[in-house]
Amino acid sequence: MTLKLTVNGQVREVAVPLNTPLLNVLRNDLALNGPKYGCGLGECGACSVLIDGMAARACVLPVSAAAGHDITTLDGLSQNGQLDPVQQAFIDAQAAQCGYCLNGMIITIRALLNHNAQPSPQQIRAALEHNLCRCGTHVEILQAAQRAVVINAAAQQEALNE
Amino acid sequence: MSKRTLPSQENSGEGLPSQLTHVRYGVIVRPPYYRWNGERFESAHLVSVDSASVASLPGQIDVVVEGNFVGVVAESLAAARDAAKQLQIEWQTIPHEPNKTLKQTLKHSEKTGSEVRSLRYQESQAGVSAQRVYGWPSRMRWGNHPGWVVADVGDYHLKIWGQTTTPLALQQDLASLTALDASQIELYSLDQQPMSSQVSGLGRHCGDDAAVDAALMSQALGCPVAVWLDARYTQDVVALGQAQRMSLKAELTDSEIARYHYRQANSSGEVAAVGLWLSGRATEPAAMPETMPETMPEAIPEVPAGDSDPTPLSASVLSPYVFRDQHLSARLQQPGQTPSSATLVGIQQAFARESFLDEVARDSGQDPVSLRIRHLKDARSIELIESVAKRAGWQVPLKKPADSVPQDLLQGRGFAFAQLPDRHQRMETGVRSAWIADVAVNRVTGDVQLTRLIVGQDDGPEVDTAGLQQTLQERILGEARPLLGQAPGFDEWGDGSDAPERGVEIAPNALVKRDSPAVTQTKTSSLRPAPDDLLTGAELSPGVAVIANALFDATGIRFRQPPFTAKRVREALKASTTEGTAQQRLAKRATGRRWLAAAALTTVAGTAVMAWPWKSTLAPVARPAANLYSAETIERGRLVAAAGDCAACHTSEGGSTNVGGRAFETPFGTLYSTNITPDEATGIGQWSYAAFERAMRHGISRDGSHLYPAFPYTAFAKTSDTDLQALYAYLMAQPAVAAEKPANELSFPFNVRALMAGWNVLYHDPTPFQPDPMQSELYNRGAYLAEGLGHCSACHTPRNAMGAEKSGNAYFAGAFVDGWEAPPLNTLSQAPVAWSEGSLFDYLRHGESALHGVASGPMAPVVAGLAELPEYDVRAIAHYVAAQMQAPTGNSDMDVAGAEQRVASAMVSSSGMEAGERLFEGACAACHVETGVPSFSRASTSLALNTNVHSDHPDNVIQSILGGVHADHVPGIGSMPGFADSFSNTQVADLATYLRARFAPDKAPWQQLEKRITDLRQPHHNNTHSTP
């Protein structure tokens, strides 16, 4: 069964069983290794991708459910060679220890900002509540998220001015 | 209630012409009584309309009243329908004879023949006289397919978007409605194509009535008005009755027909649209004598034709034959009446004449072809008929089906001939056309298949044989469709919302076996009338008669008015008592059984002895040929199979469809489903239809042994004959796969199949479904599907210790199947927010309801099966189930508010259950808790609304945690991983306890969870249910 997926702006055809998890298709068939395999049960968030701008746990989502939607992985987040403000904020804040969870953290904050450009610290915490990090980098991750809000707003303003 | 559940296209206004922006929606309210009696239109009189009765409804609602025409216009079709229902109208019914409806008239005219046969004309000593009356309906049917009809009336223009087969007649009606010139009236199809002015059917349909309705309302309100045309317009078909009645009379002396009288009893012309009559804008025909007497009316002056002069004096009646002393007459068109198209008049005349000659020939034991040849003088005609008869093998009797083939097909052959004048009204240079058709009539379904058709045509000097044959072939196909169309009924499939596809009901291959090598290239892609595929040629006129004659040959029943719908054929066949049909034998058997059941109830011990009728083996037959059934029947059977979800039980995991072998754990042991592919050795390939039907209705296998009621024949017995026949056709047309099924593992005494005889007497009622006349069509359709094919109660009704479904209050009270709870579908429903008909529809159609969640477990494949069905059928099931639940049509604001309240209060975690809370936060919350981040993979329905969490039994919650929720059946619905390998029994129990406390705080905690989890983890868990 051939499926057409729109991934990072490109239409890709994959021949896989319809109930294959989207994560497996992204990593194995399309070599997009931004999303990570963590728990496989949708619990940790390492596998997160954006679907139509919303966060989605790719490890529990059958690929058929994503067909016809816009899938964006971490690999496709940068625009015109410029990192996404959220990515830049995480680098600026040096918010990585092992880095395995960061895909999910970045994707989740991106989804949050798509929905609410000026989230409160409480809203950021609530958004990240179900993204697990086992290195204990939570403080830096929260700082990065706060910074992302600022850079993102600036980038949007800049885009408006142009 | 039923009217409010509209197919989506009706609801959304989808499919309307895009350039129309301010379309409003109209619904007509017809008088309680109105009809066309053949001469004039009569109806109840409007006394008053109380517009104030709809004033309280939201939105702008206008009531258009003109004469006896009442229309309600609103901002949506649903609003207009609601308002129409609420509108207080007072009618004054005029005294009338209610028995003069179309049906009665039809019956009468069909009877007339036999009655009149005894009324011999005494003055003719030697001759035998015959008299018949034939009819032609004012409306062939309600339309081609359901759809919008939109009118936009301005001061200097009128535009109609809709469907018609008689554009000129429609234009004329609209012109007399609006006093606009015909050039100012533009007709378009819904896809914006201007309509050709050519006639493309066998008569008007109600698309014209709908267009006039829309135009009346549009003119009154000055905005475009859309009317939804669907089977509701059937009432106009009935009310308008016959457009034309043709009386024929002749005497037969020494095989020669003399004193031939042909009279068109009604004045010729089309019957104007209902709206035109009701509004009083139609011109009443001049005063005429009251209704025509059934026998030859003497009031109409006859024009005797000379003995030797074959040319009829009345130009509008044509006959190619030469009879001694012939009288041909037709009433002239009344002023103001819409002229009938010459083509249609020709077809009507040919139908009556050719049917009549066929009747005369068969009554007097003559060959219909030679009788006609004897009365022809035109050498070319004789030559043509002889060559066609020879080519068709007219003299060779039809091969009757051998005994081994199901006896449900009746075969017949008919002949018809016509000669029509050229455009200068000259007969000799006109077209001669001789037809021979073979039909196969399915005596159960009433389906008529044109199995062979040979048409010989003499098209004047220049004959492009291949081209002509090609044209004819296409036209024959196009023409056969309206003839074989279906009328709606409770066991009819589809609401027509998929009608463009359903229009392709009969595959061309099944319909006509092409007899001519010149026509090897035929369009198999589509039967839809292409714009150029129009019924313009007069040469098609014998088409209706030839089918009527072949039908008579096949069935012994004379159809004296088209169309010959499967329903009419079926009813006529049922009414005929010529021979003991299968149904009658079955009915006898069924009544005998009921008597036994009554007696057997006295003692259970006596039951087995009394009800020990030995069931004979039904003879094996060769597998019926795949082309025995029409593509239409097989397609219907596919839908029946989808509704019955045969494959869900008759397919094992990973096995081929319908080869059986799937294990069923029952309290009595393990059963395996059987191979129902048409393999002769291991499947049902050798089953005759009689054997198949006995299994479906009585639970008895072909070899006479009893089947176990795990096979829900208790429900399937309610299926109509037509559907069973179609199902048989479908199953027999599938690929045969050889596969033996494993032997059942049942404990004694359940392994004695014969004991099922006693069980059947006690618990099985094989009477077919009876629609409840007090209920709507939608309800009855739903009941038919849910009680019969859908066998909902097989899972949702608890069974007694003998494995029989309980009745009474226990109907739909919920039960346990395969370790899942099938929740109650009656008032015992535990759903936290009450179900509504709309929610049920969403759940059954899309696998998900916003206020209840997704279908999972064994219900998932059921939803997948329902996806195959027409939307109307799923609506009907939802409607019926809603009635059992006493559920409202839609979700009330109170229900929605209640749901929001529940969701809000479940946002906060329950205290004192740390173990469960930790598990939930870790494993579930990412998808089941709202975090403020929009998520694609989050469960869309809160657990606070989940019926399973609120049930008295934890089974479905445990099953979902262990195995997950896999909604492969409806793409886009999330899937949940199973935690069987991650969680211990204690953890699952902690989690379930927590879910219950947090999301169903008003329910008592579940007890003995760990034990139940242990049971459900067993691959062969027992099927008894847990204690609450």
Image (tube, rainbow, N blue to C red):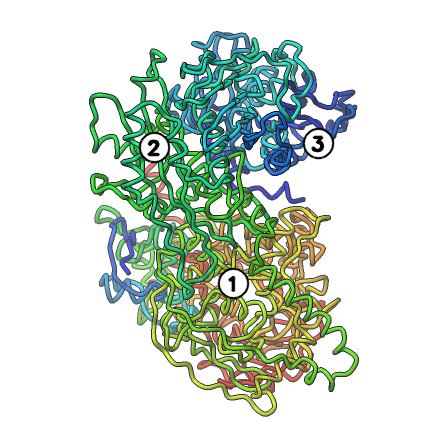
Q: Which amino acid, by three-letter code, is at mark 1?
A: Gly
Specify which label sits upstream in the sequence, 1 or 2.
2
Residue B815 in view in this figure: yes
Q: Quadrant of the C terminus of chain B?
A: bottom right
Q: Which residue is at the front of the view, A81 or B964?
A: B964
Measuring 47% from the left and 80% from the top, which residue is drawn there?
B672
Measuring 64% from the left and 25% from the top, which residue is drawn there?
B295
Q: Residue B644 has which mark?
A: 1
Q: Residue B220 has which mark?
A: none
Residue B713: where, in percent of width, then height? 57, 69
Q: Are marks 1 and 2 on the same chain?
A: yes
**Label 3 vs label 1: CA separation?**
41 Å
Q: Which residue is mark 3?
A: B57
Q: Residue furthest front?
A: B125
Residue B361: where, in percent of width, then height? 47, 37
Q: Which residue is mark 2?
A: B434
Q: Which residue is at the front of the view, B924 or B406?
A: B406
Measuring 50% from the left and 39% from the top, which residue is drawn there?
B364
Q: Are marks 3 and 1 on the same chain?
A: yes
